[in-house]
Image (cartoon, helix red, strand yellow):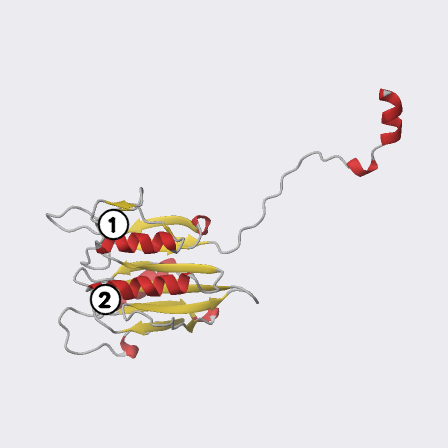
Amino acid sequence: MYTNVDTITNKMDELNARIADTDPDIVGLTEIKPKNASLDLLPQEVNIDGYTAFLNLSGRGLILYVKNCYGAVEYQPKDCSKDTVWCCIKISKTDSLVVGVAYRSPSSSDQQNASIEATIKTVAECDFRYFLLMGDFNFPEIDWISESADVPSNHPAERFLTCVQDSFLCQHVHEPTHYMQNQAANVLDLVFTNGEELMNSLQYTEPFGKSHHVTLNWTITCYQHRLYTKGVKYNYSKGEYTEMQKFFF
């Protein structure tokens, strides 16, 4: 589950109720701090029973919750952007799932944009079997159905799109996620994986409180069961080829 919660302190009861209802394995939230807040959140203010919380209080703040049973550990990419938070989940003896949450402010500097892009590329190129990144990237200029942006080549949206394509990531959100009065609806909240087949049942549900962002719910299937079909197969190694030769000649 993911959403831009637009301040978490007054929505903890709703968050706990949603979690009790939907029982998500992973929850990602952005903009968890109030605007112009002078005091940081305390970790104990955002704890949820049964979940490990990975907290980043830079800017408006990010948080990533993972069920305790998965034994998730914090992951720090090299030169990690301060606008992201990551963890790693071991899913077999050899395979891991890396999970990240990101928030890119519309007023981000070129340096901040470049840092997010570099972090995404770094993590995507690491030796993780599965990759999941969610967040609010504030790129209304990008058409994710055609994977194009009608902007100059040096525009942040075009550079971000190039980063995603160069990292061979799939973006799964194609319907608007941000609704505000007197504004056009936009696709601002995104979910990336490293495989189109990993994403199932993406749902767009109601926002938290008065947030302008929908809540996204989905299922990821890391291991696909192989399909078996019944059919007639001949054992050619046991053919009577000598007798066949006599028959034809």
**Secondary structure at numbered mark 2:** helix
Q: Which residue is mark 2?
A: 111
Q: Position of residue 205 (x, y in %)?
A: 29, 51
Q: Position of residue 173 (x, y in %)?
A: 32, 49
Residue 40 sits in quarter? bottom left
As drawn, 20 above or below 238:
below
**Secondary structure at numbered mark 1:** loop
In the rendered structure, which disc, 1 or 2, sits on the residue that comes first in sequence? 2
Residue type, label 2: Gln
What's the mark number on residue 67?
Answer: none
Frontmost residue, 156 versus 188: 156
Q: Residue furthest front?
A: 153
Residue at point 32%, 60% (across, down): 18
Badge 1 vs badge 2, beta-carbon distance below 8 Å: no
What's the mark number on residue 187?
Answer: 1
Q: Note whether residue 31 is visible.
A: no
How many other residues sit within 10 Å of disc 2, few (<14), some (14-19) or many (≥20)?
Answer: few
Residue 106 sits in quarter? bottom left
